[in-house]
Amino acid sequence: MLQWDIEQMGRGIAELNSDRGDIASPLVDEVLGAGGQVVCKPWVARNGKSFAKGDFKLNLRDLTITCPAGETERIEFGAVVEFDPEACDHCRLRAKCTAASAGSGRTVAIAENERLQHKLRKLQKTPTGRAKLRERVAVEHQLAHIGRRQGRRARYRGVRKNLFDLRRACAIQNFETIQRKAA
């Protein structure tokens, strides 16, 4: 609905602030395709006390991934890479890398949108990127206030009435914010 509203105004989305749950949305691809920017925290791959995905060297140009011990495998977007089980069995770093049984190699999941995730991880490490992510906190607070004002369920039957109710709640929230800043 929001995208339709933006199109009706004859505008485009230059910067999309999103959360991780919506990062796989087709809208993200549209914004990036139109030259826009996506601001979002990247997914963080953790692996307990073992090496995390970030400890592996990911080469998106050559489509390879290299483990901390130097073994390299080809990657495919949206697939899981399994390192050579024989190489993993004799690796000096195996205990730090995987808890899999002998005969199984370390696996690393490669996201369908790994290029975007990689870009978001890089952005997060820069002062500019962290500042952009901090701007989102204010937006999240406003959304929380609107959610509290409206409740968890729609009040009316039908999209049209509920959209009107949402816009009413947003207008009230904006007026309260203006009043608070003016005081």
Image (cartoon, rainbow, N blue to C red):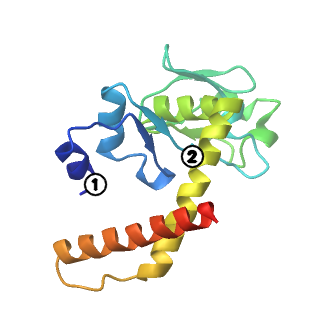
Which badge, 1 or 2, is on the more N-terminal residue? 1
Q: Position of residue 101 (x, y in %)?
A: 68, 48
Q: Residue furthest front?
A: 183
Report helix, strand or loop for mark 1.
helix
Report helix, strand or loop for mark 2.
loop
Type of amino acid under label 1: Leu
Q: Residue furthest top?
A: 62
Residue at 34%, 35% in the rendered image: 31
- The one nearer the camera, 114 or 53, is 114
Q: Quadrant of the N terminus?
A: bottom left
- The one nearer the camera, 61 or 154, is 154
Instruction: Please indicate whether residue 2 sits to the left or right of residue 19 in the image.
Output: left
Instruction: Please indicate whether residue 154 sits to the left or right of residue 39 in the image.
Output: left
- The one nearer the camera, 96 or 12, is 12
Q: Quadrant of residue 159?
A: bottom left
- The one nearer the camera, 9 or 128, is 9
Q: Vertical placement of 73 versus 169: above or below?
A: above
Work out whether residue 33 can be spotted. yes
Residue at 46%, 39% in the rendered image: 111
Q: Vertical placement of 157 versus 32: above or below?
A: below
Q: Nearer the viewer, mark 1 or mark 2?
A: 1
Please name the residue that numbered disc 1 is placed on. 2
Please name the residue that numbered disc 2 is placed on. 43
Judge the density around disc 2: few (<14), some (14-19), many (≥20) Cα neighbours within 10 Å. Answer: some
Spatial distance from mark 1 to mark 2, Cα to Cα? Answer: 25 Å
Q: Vertical placement of 107 versus 4: above or below?
A: above
Residue at 48%, 26% in the rendered image: 75
Residue at 67%, 38% in the rendered image: 130
